[in-house]
Image: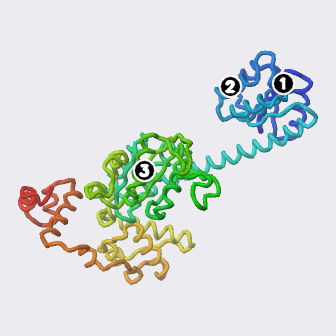
Amino acid sequence: MTGFKIFIVEDDPWYGEILAYHLGLNPDYSVSRFETAKDCIAKMHLKPDLVTIDFSLPDMNGDDLFRKIREINPQLPVIVISSQEEVSIAVNLLKMGVNDYLVKDEATKDLLWNSVIRIRETQSLKKEVEHLREELGQRFSFQKTLIGQSESLKKVFNMINKAVKTNINILINGETGTGKEVVAKAIHYNSDRKKKNFVAVNMAAFPKDLIESELFGHEKGAFTGAVARKAGKFEEANGGTIFLDEIAEMDLGLQTKLLRVLQEREVVRVGGNEKVKLDVRLIVATHKNLTEEVRKGNFREDLFFRIMGLPIELPPLRERDKDILILAKHFADEFAKENKMGSIQFTKEAKDKLMKYHFPGNVRELKAVIDLAVVMCEDNEIKPEDITFTSAKKDDYFIPENKTLRQYTCDIIRQHLKKNDNDVIATAAALDIGKSTIYKMMQTGELE
């Protein structure tokens, strides 16, 4: 059987033949008739695309047959055709999930024809959306979107692998431009929730008086300008993932409401009383130290423990060694392909210039630098003079605040200890200092 498969369940052979003949006028439809519910159920393994059922069958009524069909295939569209005109029966069936309810009369054939067309169009759209989601999932395969081979990035891959296997909350920490949203999307589109929505919200992008409505929705008349009910981002993400970027910027009052939503797994729209049940995976991100924000009183401790779940630390680009060159080549090839420019090469001097720069804007800054360099270069070869850095001077990077030389020394040693998994000997060798210096600083409490 080929084409769009339609099962017609009708105990009146004459009427069933009329419906089958009428739908069969479309060569894309493959129509099969059954006179009992039992016969229809026995053939469900043929996987029909649509079933029409008579409400009054000799061996089973319409709502019981509908339940049986839904047990076999919860997504299968069903149309009920009945001689009964009672509104209560129609309403009940529609509430159960029947796609359409038609009363037997002279217009039934045409109404059925139009109903099948609508259902088929809806199914086509759903399949298209599902296909696009699968494509998006492949696109956000983290091995493809997080480019690099450094040890620090391999640790991120390992954490993402753990994250996709469960629904645990995720806390992503990293400097601006390190790819926090890319990681969040990679987790979502490689998890069991990939066919549902991924909804991203930047907490720093909305005014304080609008963010509650944006997250939780509002009812009509809840405030001036609320001319209609609006679902919030949490409702949009139901069944999928919500990504709250820059979570540390959230107002303390809103933190309390978010905590309640996470605890109760339900949301109440602004100005309403109805509780909307939620099944949402939460991923949050920040460039700040949330532990420090809790200590300062800027972030609720109970919310911190609720959202932290699995922590993923994204390394800054300056700690990813030759990933800089791998990413530079990737961005150059990507930009050249988009602009039909052919393969791009880097001179040794250009590579040296990239490796010596500290990239305070991280991966985002590198991409902007490379895009410009591709435009500026001649003969598809990037030279040092094609590379322009527009961020703060390197000296400014090392003096973000007033510190003593000793404090800066501690910061540098601490950074290298972290990079070397707290290996004192490797850190001492990298900094060309004695390991006893590091041990003494640990004993005095200067280094944790």
Residue sitting at 34 percent across and 71 percent down?
359
Q: Residue furthest right?
A: 106
Which amino acid type is marked by label 1? Glu
- Which residue does the numbered mark 2 point to in the structure image? 67
Badge 2 marks a residue whose secondary structure is helix
Q: Is residue 33 left or right of residue 433?
A: right
- Which residue does the numbered mark 1 point to in the structure image? 10
Count of labels shown?
A: 3
Q: Is residue 442 left or right of residue 298?
A: left
Q: Is residue 58 left or right of residue 77?
A: right
Is the C-beta separation of discs 3 and 2 under 8 Å? no
- Which residue does the numbered mark 3 point to in the structure image? 283
Residue 219 image label: none
Name the quarter where the C terminus is drawn.
bottom left
- Can residue 114 be seen here? The reply is yes
- Quick one: label 3 or label 1, which is nearer the N terminus? 1
Query: Which quadrant of the figure has residue 250?
Result: bottom left
Q: How crowded is mark 3: few (under 14 residues within 10 Å), some or many (20 or more)?
A: many
Residue sitting at 76 percent across and 24 percent down?
62
- Label 3 and label 2: CA atoms lie apart by 37 Å
Which amino acid type is marked by label 3? Ile
Residue 278 spot, x, y in % from top left: 51, 41
Is the C-beta separation of discs 2 and 1 under 8 Å? no
Badge 1 marks a residue whose secondary structure is loop
Residue 340 spot, x, y in % from top left: 57, 72
- Above/below status of 148 relative to 190: below
Residue 3 spot, x, y in % from top left: 77, 39
Residue 262 spot, x, y in % from top left: 43, 44
Foreground mark, 3 or 1, reads: 3
